[in-house]
Image (cartoon, rainbow, N blue to C red):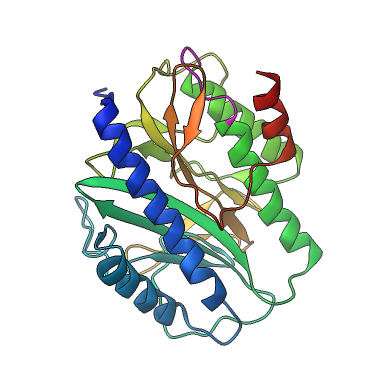
Amino acid sequence: MSITIKTPEEIEKMRVAGRLASELLDYLTPHVQPGVTTKAIDKLAYDYITQVQQAIPAPLNYAPPGYTPYPASICTSVNNVICHGIPNDKALKSGDVVNIDVTVIKDGFHGDCSRMFSIGTVPRHVQRLVDITFEAMWHGIALVRPGARLGDIGHVIQTFAESAGYSVVREFCGHGIGRKFHEDPQVLHYGKAGTGEILREGMTFTIEPMINAGRRDIREMADGWTIVTKDRSLSAQWEHTVLVTPTGFEVLTTSAGCQPAPDFVRQTALAA
């Protein structure tokens, strides 16, 4: 495994890219409404990234080995879509939930984050899935510090999600990030505490659990990108890019409109 430890100069560029990604989601938020298509949201994102932020949308034409180029600037995963949903002409409706996943390249560095959006009036059980997934991500982030292990992160996310009655997708995971969109290490959202790579100061990676209301099994759609739940149950995901600091963590993908960390994270930080 070849993990890139970022220099102070590189970390500062990661902060900029991360902030831009989060600010893009801030900009998109008021447009994510009933009657709006995800394709329209994608167009807004492309224009904002390229014209306002003077940056590059990393997903557009991204083509890892074995994949056709991704055709949009963001991923929009609605309801039972787990990840990599391609924006389309279908309008969002009240009761839907959608994950919008964005990655911005600025000065050669990537900032990657996603948020869940509840459209109109959402049933309580649906909102619970969204909220529990948000907390699961933060349970993982809260453990980030030098000397911790990747398995600690996966274990706490899995334990928390499964204790709430949900399942954790295993085929997709968080990842190192920097000059490259996807770097080492892989950050699993399940696993055994005390195992895996030891975290070191200067590592940057994403934590992005995908939590299903039903079973964890997945299915790939014919477009080669869109991943859905095999049992058609709902799925949710949140994502932040984090930095391992000398004493803990720094979330790089924050902005004015970013949903604050849960109380348990803020209390832990104050106690430290």
Residue 16, horizontal then vertical, whole percent = 34, 46
Residue furthest right as drawn: 124
Give the magenta range.
142-148
**Image height check: is 257 above or below 189?**
below
Residue 23, horizontal then vertical, whole percent = 44, 59
Please indicate whether residue 104 sits to the left or right of residue 229 in the image. left
- Towards the viewer: 228 or 161: 161
* Residue at the image position 37 percent from the left and 65 percent from the top: 74
User: Can you tell which quarter of the image residue 47 is in?
Assistant: bottom left
Please indicate whether residue 45 sits to the left or right of residue 61 in the image. right
Residue 193, horizontal then vertical, whole percent = 57, 18
The C terminus sits in image quarter: top right
* Residue at the image position 50 percent from the left and 52 percent from the top: 255
The N terminus sits in image quarter: top left
Q: Is residue 146 magenta?
A: yes
**Image height check: is 79 above or below 267?**
below
Is any atom of residue 72 visible in this view? Answer: no
Residue 234, horizontal then vertical, whole percent = 63, 61
Is any atom of residue 189 visible in this view? Answer: yes
* Residue at the image position 52 percent from the left and 77 percent from the top: 31
User: What's the magenta bit mostly, secondary-structure-wise?
Assistant: loop
- Towards the viewer: 24 or 238: 24
